[in-house]
Image (cartoon, rainbow, N blue to C red):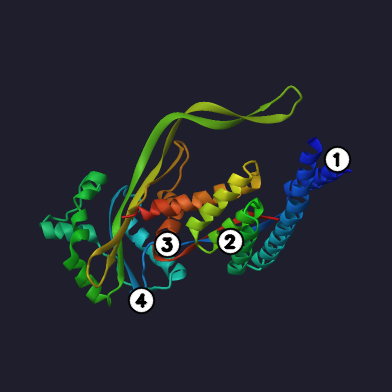
Amino acid sequence: MTKRVLLAAALILATALPAYADKRSDAKAQVSFGILVAQKHLWKEAARAWERATELDPTYAAAWNNLGIGYEQLGRFNDARKAYDKAQELDPNNTLIRNNNDQFREIYDRQNRRSGGR
Amino acid sequence: MIARTVAAAAASLALAVGSAGCLSFYEIGVETPIQAKLDVSPFQRVLVAGFVTGGSRNIDPNTETARLLRSQLRTKSDLKVVDTDVMQLADEIDKRRGAAQTPSPTDEPRIKNEQDLQAYEEIFKDADYWKKIGAEFQMPLIITGTVLFTEVEKSGVVNKPTSFVDSQGITRYQESRTYSELKGYALAPKFIFIDGRTGQVLYSEGFHEERLYPKDQNTPALSTYFELMDSLLPSFLNTLSTQRIRGTRILLK
């Protein structure tokens, strides 16, 4: 009985891990490409790459964080807020993600306060 | 055999999780765009007409504000700034009321506080008046409003850094709470944006800023005024044009 359970677990791991690793490595390639183009300030292309990364691996906190930055630079503040929140939800102890989100929130709140205007 | 396979799989999983935890990062300079509050595309020109001002007589907030906003708009907006004399709106209202414009013998300002200012705000609702001004200057976007620049005196307990030499002879600093008398200025402008074609108010926004200094420090009113205006200029400019806020973000891999 124990052997069967162990065998089943091994089979699940053996099939799931490579698939997960493949997706994560594809997502990582997209994230790397996004960083490369973001450094040239091509934010549209960068955001597109990070969107692909999050589609490939929705649990990839770094990809969501970068996507938040990309959307922020494109002025898509509501999308940026969702992306940053998702990154923080996936990796709540990551101070780099939290700092990015906090800095964005300052601008986001200011913009929304001003929308109250007249 | 099976146990070994499971152990290997678990190890690779741990490695995967471990490597995921070991993130590399890149700091990148960003310029976050803040969208303009107003759509100014129907206008080619902007007229900073003048302001109803009050408070301290140490400076002329009407002239200074108009001059400062015009120079900022010249460099930071695409609109052509109309160069004309600054309008004396308070005089215009007094003239309408039939009030004599004799200078006060005590040198007291006409408008001392918010309450006095409110009595003059009716002019901003006079669409016909602004439409006439608009026609005179080729239908610009008109910027007007109120500016209250007042002297402030406050006293209370404030945190002050004080130095002391410790037992090893090293100078150290610590925050200490001391009673202090402060004076300075408060600036409360309200910018009103009027459509020169219709005379209607498009948007208005008010601010309040204060700067206080130790009572014995002599700070000129004009330098405090510019310091206060500096802090709210980005918000003012953002009404007319998209502003970019510079900062840094961390990209993660």
Chain for mark 3? Answer: B
Q: Work out whether residue B116 can be spotted.
A: yes
Q: Quadrant of the N terminus of chain A?
A: top right
Marks 1/2: CA distance?
45 Å
Nearest-to-viewer mark from 1 and 3: 1
Sequence-first disc among 4 and 3:
4
Labels 2 and 3 within one chain: no
Point out the image quarter for the C terminus of chain A: bottom left
* N-terminal-most mark, 4 or 1: 1
Q: Toward which corner of the image does residue A27 lie, by quadrant?
A: bottom right
The secondary structure type at the circle numbered 3 is: helix
Q: Quick check: marks 4 and 1 in contact, CB under 8 Å?
A: no
**Alpha carbon distance from label 1 to label 3:** 68 Å
Check whether the beta carbons of the residues at disc 2 and disc 4 lie within 8 A of each other.
Answer: no
The residue wearing badge 4 is: B44
Q: Which label sits in the foreground, 1 or 2?
A: 1
- Amino acid type indicated by mark 2: Gly
